[in-house]
Image (cartoon, rainbow, N blue to C red):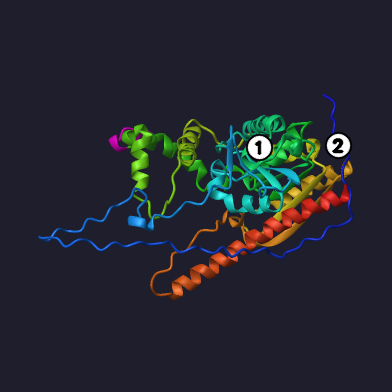
Amino acid sequence: MALSHSPPFSRSSFSISTSTKTQNPTLSPSSFRTTPAPPLPIHVPRVVPFLSDGFVGSLKPTPSPKPYVRKDTCLVVPPPRGRKPLAVVKFLGGAFVGAVPEVTYGHLMELLAREGYLVISVPYNVTFNHEMAARQVYERFHACFDGFLESGLPDASISPLEISGLPLYSVGHSNGALLQLLVGSYFDEKLPQANAIVSFNNKPATEAVPYFEQLGPFMSQVLPVVESIPVYSMATSASESTLKALMDTAGSVIQEIDKEAFLSLTKFADQLPSVFNQVREGTSEFKPTPPENREFFKKSYFVPRTLLVKFSTDAIDESDTIEEVLRPRVESFGGKIEKITLSGNHLTPCFQDLKWPVGPLYTPADALAQSLKSLSLNETRVLSRTITDWFESLDIDS
C-alpha cells in the first residue's frame, strides 16, 4: 500500500509557557435543619441512620458531575460546554493504569480539555504483546471517532460539523507512549499530525519486571495453590451486588460508585491473572522485543511532529535513547522532533486533585501533605501547559 500522508509541518522554534492556571473552587456549606425531639416517657437509645456511602443524616455530599463521557470502548473528556474544540487528542496511559484513565489520568485529561481539546482515551489491558495492543487501540479509537463524525457528542453539545476536519494529535505516557509510536509505525493512514510522547519506556522484560526470570517458575507453582483456596474461588465468583456492598462499607472514602466505574475497576483487577498466566505459560519477553521496536521505528515511523517529554527524576525514562532512534527518521521526510525536560517524576501525569482531610487541629503532617500535593499538582499543570502550548505552536506553523 502506498504511503499517503499530509504535508509535514515546519517551524524553527516554539516557546513553552510554564505559567499555571489555578482555580479556587468555593465549597458551599451544607444547610441543616434541626427539629427538637419530643419528650420521651422512657429512655430510648438514639439511632443514627447510616447511609450506604458512609455519611450520616444530612451530611451526605452531593456528588459532582463526572467530567467524562463513555462512548463504546472509549472515555471522552470534552472541552468546556459552549467552546468549540481546537483539536482531537487521542490519549493512552501507562501499563495497568491505562485501563482506568478516569481514575489515574483524570486530572491531566481535564486540564487538556479545559484548554479546548476533545480528549479521547482508549483504555487497554496490559499485555506482553505490544503489537496486538497497538493495533487494538488504533481500531478502538477510530471506531469511536467515526461514530463522533456521524452523530457528534450530544452530551457535550458538540455537533459532527464541529468535529469534522479537526487536527488529530496524540498523547502517550510510559507504555502508552510506546503504543503511540507503534501506531505511528504500523499504519499508513489516519495517523495523528503530532505525537506528545511522555516518559517513554520500553525496557526488556527482565529490567521492567524485577526478578522476571524467576517469576515464571514461581507462578507455575503458586497459581494452582492459590486457585484452589476457597476464598479465591469465592472472590472470583462474587456477584456485582456483593462486591458493591463491600465497596459501600468504605463509603467515607469512596463517595460515589457508579456501575460503569465499578466495571472499570473490575477490568483493572482482571489484568493481573492474565499477565500471570502469560508468564506461567512461558512468556519471557515483550513482543516485539525492544531492539525490534527500535529498528522498526527507524524504518517506518511517519508522524511528522514529535515532542519528547522527560522528567527530572525518572530512573526508567528512555527519552534520550528514543530521540537518537527517531531523529534521523523524522528528519528524513521533513518532519521535526523536539525534546524538553520538566520538573517531576514518572508518576507526575497520574497525580490527581484529591481532597486532603484536615482534622480539628492543623498538624505539621497536614502542612507537609498539602505542600507535597500542591507541588505535584503544579508539575502536572506545567506538563499540561507544555503539551497544549506545543499543540498551539503547530497551529501557528500550519
* Residue 88 in the image, given as x and y percentages of width and height: 72, 42
Q: Is residue 187 left or right of residue 371?
A: right
Residue 359: mark in rendering: none
Which residue is more in the foreground, 73 or 147? Answer: 147
Q: Secondary structure at mark 1?
A: loop
User: What residue span does the magenta drawing correspond to?
Assistant: 224-231
Q: CA distance from mark 1 to mark 2?
A: 26 Å
Q: Secondary structure at mark 2?
A: loop
Q: Amino acid at mark 2?
A: Ser
10 Å crowding of disc 1: few (<14), some (14-19), many (20+): some
Q: Compared with residue 47, is residue 19 higher up or lower down, i.e. above or below?
A: below
10 Å crowding of disc 2: few (<14), some (14-19), many (20+): few
Residue linked to disc 2: 6
Instruction: Answer yes or no: is residue 320 visible.
Output: no
* The stretch drawn in magenta includes residue 376: no
Q: Residue lying farthest left? A: 42
Q: Earlier in the sequence, mark 1 or mark 2?
A: 2
What residue sits 42% from the left and 34% below the top?
Answer: 220
Q: Compared with residue 12, is residue 227 higher up or lower down, i.e. above or below?
A: above
Disc 1 vs disc 2: Cβ atoms closer than 8 Å?
no
What residue sits 63% from the left and 48% below the top?
Answer: 174
Q: Amino acid at mark 1?
A: Leu
Which residue is more in the foreground, 97 or 387? Answer: 387
Q: Is residue 35 left or right of residue 181?
A: left
What residue sits 36% from the left and 46% below the top?
Answer: 248
Which residue is more in the foreground, 385 or 292? Answer: 385
Residue linked to disc 1: 153
Q: Is residue 117 left or right of residue 97?
A: right
